[in-house]
Amino acid sequence: MYRKISIIGTGLIGGSLALLLKKILPDIKLIAVDLPSVIQNLPSDSPFDEVFDSNDISEALKDSELIFLGLPISGIIDILPQVMSDSKEGAVICDLGSVNTAILKEAEKNLITGKYFIGGHPIGGSEGEGFNDASADYLDGVKFMLSPASNVPKEVLKNLSDFLTKLNFEVHVMDSVIHDRIIAYTSHLPQFISTALTLSVGQIDDSEQTVGRGMYSMTRLASSPPKIWNDIIRFNNKEIREAISVFSAFLSEIENDILDGSISEKFNSAAELKKKIRGEN
């Protein structure tokens, strides 16, 4: 088992992972790395045993056996060469981004013998940001996708998978290209649907007087931080546009079905697919 873990980026994902780690495995030594302004604002009861600002990465990674990268996608890509260089021999580096292919390509360019990069994506889904919104419960029981680099031995991948399973993640190993296409539909598309729905309803006067639970749940993601999504759009652009195009086509079909009075077929098909998507079969 890993005894010393560094987390670079202590926002919603990195912070939640740290809280979950300390909750389940309190004896693990946790190291935080972030901007000085962020480190200064971490609460006194944070789960981290040591904190370093981003100018001291080499010291922060010293002897760390597992390193998580909880930065925005562009930040992960920028810092990967230094992390690969400064980490100890045998270290495992795993990102926490929501797009794998671009990050994995950068990792492949910086592979070092005896150091292993495994692309990662814990599928949480929240409109929050920053450590103040972090919670151990936020990641408890969620899916954690892994996409290993070409030099990762099976036993190294298994060790990380087993460790994440111990943390109550549902671990899946998937090719990064396949991951990015699927996640465009299952994670990225819902964000843009929520945004478009909120903008649409916002055109109607007094709409807040008739909003119910369904509307609340479907518009929750509308307050997601745009700076995170700018990176996601940049690095998964083609896949996101494909998902939006498919969704738009179904909306057009539904509009035609409404005109024809034949909406039942779409409702019945969606009800069956919902069971499959949610694992209810």
Image (spheres, rainbow, N blue to C red):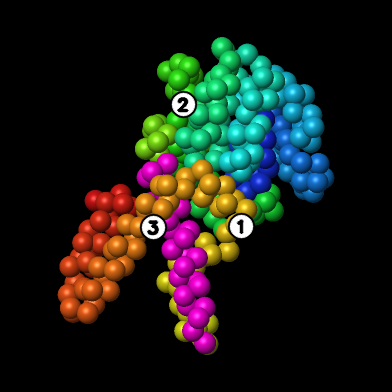
Looking at the image, is 85 positioned above or below residue 164? above
> Is residue 69 among the parts visible in the rendering?
no
The amino acid marked with disc number 2 is: Pro
Residue bearing the label numbered 2: 148
Residue bearing the label numbered 1: 225
Q: Is residue 185 left or right of residue 65?
A: left
Q: Is residue 21 magenta?
A: no
Looking at the image, is 81 positioned above or below residue 7? above
Measure the alpha-carbon separation of dots 3 and 1.
20 Å
User: In this orientation, which residue lies closer to the viewer: 152 or 176?
Assistant: 176
Looking at the image, is 9 positioned above or below residue 276? above
Sequence-wise first label, 3 or 1: 1
**CB contact under 8 Å: marks 1 and 2:** no
Residue at left offset 33%, top offset 52%: 278
Residue bearing the label numbered 3: 244
- Of helix, strand and loop, which one carries label 2? strand
Q: Is residue 263 left or right of residue 42?
A: left
What span is colored magenta in the figure? 180-205
Secondary structure mainly formed by the magenta segment: helix
Residue at left offset 40%, top offset 47%: 239
Q: Position of residue 129 (x, y in %)?
A: 64, 53
User: In this orientation, which residue lies closer to the viewer: 25 or 118?
Assistant: 118
